Image (tube, helix red, strand yellow):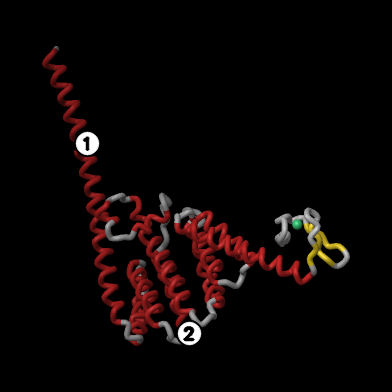
């Protein structure tokens, strides 16, 4: 627990004496009630400070600090959706090759807790943030392999945020990402009983995209396609086509890049051989 701070002089050196709290620095006395108010005021100020630090570090893509601040907030404000979600989210963003599987599992296990914490009237905005961030995370992980190809033609199709993982080369199976999105979509749909059709359909649709990529059984994809059609979210079909198209372009660019690299190697070998041939011929001519 944080020590309370004297209102008059700012000192933390406050002791209990004869049923009152006394500042040993300036001598100001506080009743129990006043001391309690001082305590809450200092907790509130501390919490506000931690939230602004966490958000600021997240904005500047310092995910390690953002994660640490959100974890600290959780110790004080354990039932708020924001630290519950983002402590886990930024832990995934800080993952490396060895920790990504475990961190993703923890992230999915966190879904029931964050949904429990979203209880207020204005839950739609918060749910949308959770869904959008999870969707972005899946897309970042799905595309992270493309980071190795630092080609503007490829990068053009992805937001700058794709580079959130810096140089980490993360590989995650497409079906793991699909299951993560199905899970969140199903959970939101079950809890709010079809109230947020567009949010859940977007998650299911993206999950289907990765399912196709991961060679998932067709019946699962068909099951969610049927649900999307049932919810009449036709605009998502258009998004799917765009996403498929973008993916196809990305794959072609990567193939082209690989071929370019191969061509460069062949050229290099030919040039080297030509150089030695030239040297050998010159040698012969001179001697
Ligand atoms: Zn004082």
Depth check: give the residue in front, 131 or 209.
131
75 over 95 or under it: above or below: below
Sequence-earlier tag: 2 or 1: 2
Q: Residue at x 58, y 64 (%)?
A: 48
Residue 35 in which image quadrant? bottom right
226 over 106 or under it: above or below: below
Residue furthest right in the image = 18
Q: Residue at x 48, y 84 (%)?
A: 192
Q: Secondary structure at mark 2?
A: helix
Few, some or many C-alpha atoms within 10 Å of disc 2 (few <14, some 14-19, many ≥20)? few
Depth check: give the residue in front, 266 or 45.
45
Depth check: give the residue in front, 271 or 162.
162
Question: In the image, is 130 to the left or to the right of 240?
Answer: right
Depth check: give the residue in front, 129 or 37.
37
Q: Which residue is mark 1?
A: 268
Identify the image quadrant of the N terminus.
bottom right
Q: Residue at x 51, y 56 (%)?
A: 99
Q: Residue at x 21, y 40 (%)?
A: 266
Measured as percent of width and height from the top left, residue 33 is found at: 76, 72
The mark lying in front, picked from 2 and 1, is 2
Measured as percent of width and height from the top left, residue 260 is found at: 22, 47
Q: Which residue is mark 2?
A: 192
Question: Can residue 95 be seen by looking at this rendering?
Answer: no
């Amino acid at each position: 627990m944080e020590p309370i701070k004297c209102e008059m002089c700012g000192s933390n050196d406050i002791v209990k004496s004869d049923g009152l709290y006394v500042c040993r620095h300036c001598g100001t006395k506080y009743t129990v009630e006043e001391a309690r108010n001082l305590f809450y005021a200092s907790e509130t100020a501390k919490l506000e400070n931690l939230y602004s630090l966490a958000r600021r570090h997240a904005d500047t893509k310092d995910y390690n600090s953002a994660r640490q601040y959100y974890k600290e907030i959780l110790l004080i404000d354990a039932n708020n959706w924001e630290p519950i979600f983002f402590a886990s989210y930024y832990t995934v963003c800080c993952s490396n090759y060895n920790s990504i599987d475990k961190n993703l599992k923890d992230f999915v296990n966190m879904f029931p807790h964050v949904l429990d914490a979203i209880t207020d009237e204005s839950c739609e905005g918060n749910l949308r943030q959770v869904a959008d961030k999870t969707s972005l995370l899946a897309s970042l992980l799905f595309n992270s392999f493309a980071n190795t190809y630092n080609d503007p033609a490829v990068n053009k199709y992805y937001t700058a945020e794709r580079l959130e993982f810096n140089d980490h080369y993360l590989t995650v199976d497409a079906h793991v990402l699909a299951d993560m999105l199905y899970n969140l979509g199903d959970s939101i749909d079950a809890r709010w009983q079809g109230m947020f059709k567009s949010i859940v359909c977007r998650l299911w649709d993206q999950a289907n995209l990765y399912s196709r990529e991961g060679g998932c059984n067709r019946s699962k994809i068909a099951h969610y396609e049927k649900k999307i059609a049932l919810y009449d979210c036709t605009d998502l079909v258009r998004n799917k086509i765009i996403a498929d198209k973008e993916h196809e372009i990305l794959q072609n660019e990567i193939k082209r890049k690989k071929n370019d690299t191969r061509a460069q190697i062949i050229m290099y070998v030919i040039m080297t051989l030509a150089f030695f041939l030239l040297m050998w011929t010159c040698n012969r001519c001179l001697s």
